[in-house]
Image (tube, helix red, strand yellow):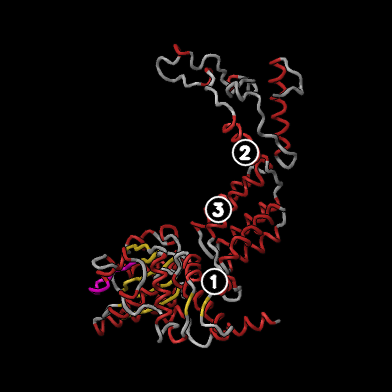
Amino acid sequence: MARDLFSSAVEERLTRRAPLAARLRPRSLDEVVGQSHLLGPGKPLRTLLESDRLSSVVLWGPPGTGKTTIARLVAGVTAKAFETLSAVTAGVKDVREVVERARARLGEQGQGTILFLDEVHRFNRTQQDVLLPHVEEGLLVLVGATTENPFFSLTAPLLSRSMLFRLEPVGAEDLRALLDRALADPDRGLGGEGLAVDAGALDHLVDRAEGDARHALTSLEVAAALALEDGRTTVTLVDAEAALAMRALRYGDDEHYDVLSAFIKSIRGSDPDAGLYWLARMLEAGEDPRLVARRLVILASEDVGMADPRALLVAEAAARAVELVGMPEVRLNLAHAVVYLATAPKSNRVTAALQAATADVRERASGAVPAHLRDASYRGAARLGHGEGYVYPHDAPAGWVPQEYRPPEVAGRRYYEPGTHGAEAEVAEALERRRSAGRHREGRGPDERE
């Protein structure tokens, strides 16, 4: 109960005024941190902004890198009218209303219009097609902001008529400078609170921001509120860690690895409901769906393997869907993969087999490639004996012949031992038939192994 009251007090303190990230939003190009490759002196985007000669552009980059900030700066320097829409809530009707105002404005006042379309990747093909002719004729100058790969999320005609600027995650030194500015500014920042931040706490906030300036400022604000609520004017590492972990305010980066671990273990344990719960928790917190997809692809081979060979195809399809579909619809594709993998039969025999083979490679003599397996395709190879004695499996009625494919140093070593779950039981039977045939040819008993 005490902790709940404390958390409520912190949240109340944070809601008394606008968020720190909003208060510190840059008012000029010189205040923007990072993106020097675009906004440094003489760089292309800065030149276009300062000369008010901006043509349609798409700003592509991770969250907290300055896409909306740049758009707001455009509004402050351009002689054109500036309209704003969010693709999350806007539809074709909203676009047509902007077009009507732009046409009237151009005809009556000779003034052009810039349309800032946030989350432009959320517009479907039909909505983008409605926008296209007005961008093409120059009635609208489009400034689109997206966190998704525009080559997948935007139509080729719209993308070809826009300049693409890629924003990079904000570097550690720039983030540190931003936090220092927040602590020093008495009007828009925390300068009026008389706060100091321990070096370890500042390092932690910078490191865990992962290039996201908004996240860094939000975390600093929460850490400062925690310290002030406790009657202290120094933000400690404990405050920084708590700020990153306060679930009510932000999905904590400290929690990231634990949640991901629970997600994988739930699917490995064949619990689809738990897998879906952790998936929803990660996606609702803003976790990168590409990370989730990569883990599913790994799990398909590590924990399902040959028990269901199709599992890897399902996981890989979900990973492709992340790029082709994007959020929020790709949540369904990821959920599909989670349920499939969780309910599939499990086997880690592929993982164990690779580990065993790797151990032999590292610990045993490697041995030369047997002569019958060597490349015999070039002139003179036959004189060296390359390929001699090799039997082409497709010439055999069964499509297989007993033949040694490894050097003598590791011949007969068994790495892959199929399990009894799912399709792997059939694989085990087929392998045993072939191994029995090989032992019979060599005159060995059924239980003799090296």
Q: Is residue 53 magenta?
A: yes
Mark 2 crowdedness (10 Å alpha carbons): few <14, some 14-19, many ≥20: some
Principal secondary structure, stretch drawn in magenta: loop
- Image quadrant for the N terminus? bottom right
Q: Nearer the viewer, mark 1 or mark 3?
A: 1
Which picture quadrant has residue 378? top left
* Mark 1 to mark 2 CA distance (whole Å): 40 Å
Disc 1 is placed on an element classified as helix
Residue under label 3: 294
Which residue does the image show at 23% across and 66% down from the upper left? 42
Write down the region rendered in magenta: 49-57
Q: Nearer the viewer, mark 2 or mark 3?
A: 2
Q: Which of marks 1 and 3 is nearer the N terminus?
A: 1
Residue under label 2: 355
> In this rendering, is residue 366 above or below 228?
above
Q: Does the magenta stretch include residue 357?
A: no
Which residue does the image show at 58% across and 65% down from the upper left? 254
Q: Residue furthest top?
A: 383
Which picture quadrant has residue 307? top right
Mark 1 crowdedness (10 Å alpha carbons): few <14, some 14-19, many ≥20: some
Residue 360: % across, % down: 60, 31
Residue under label 1: 237
Disc 3 is placed on an element classified as helix
State left or right for residue 418 relative to residue 132: right
Specify whether residue 391 is in view.
yes
Residue 239: % across, % down: 56, 75
* Mark 1 to mark 3 CA distance (whole Å): 32 Å
Kind of residue at disc 2: Gln
> In this rendering, is residue 426 above or below 441?
below
> In this rendering, is residue 418 above or below 159?
above
In depth, the one of 406 and 272 nearer the eye is 406
Kind of residue at disc 1: Leu
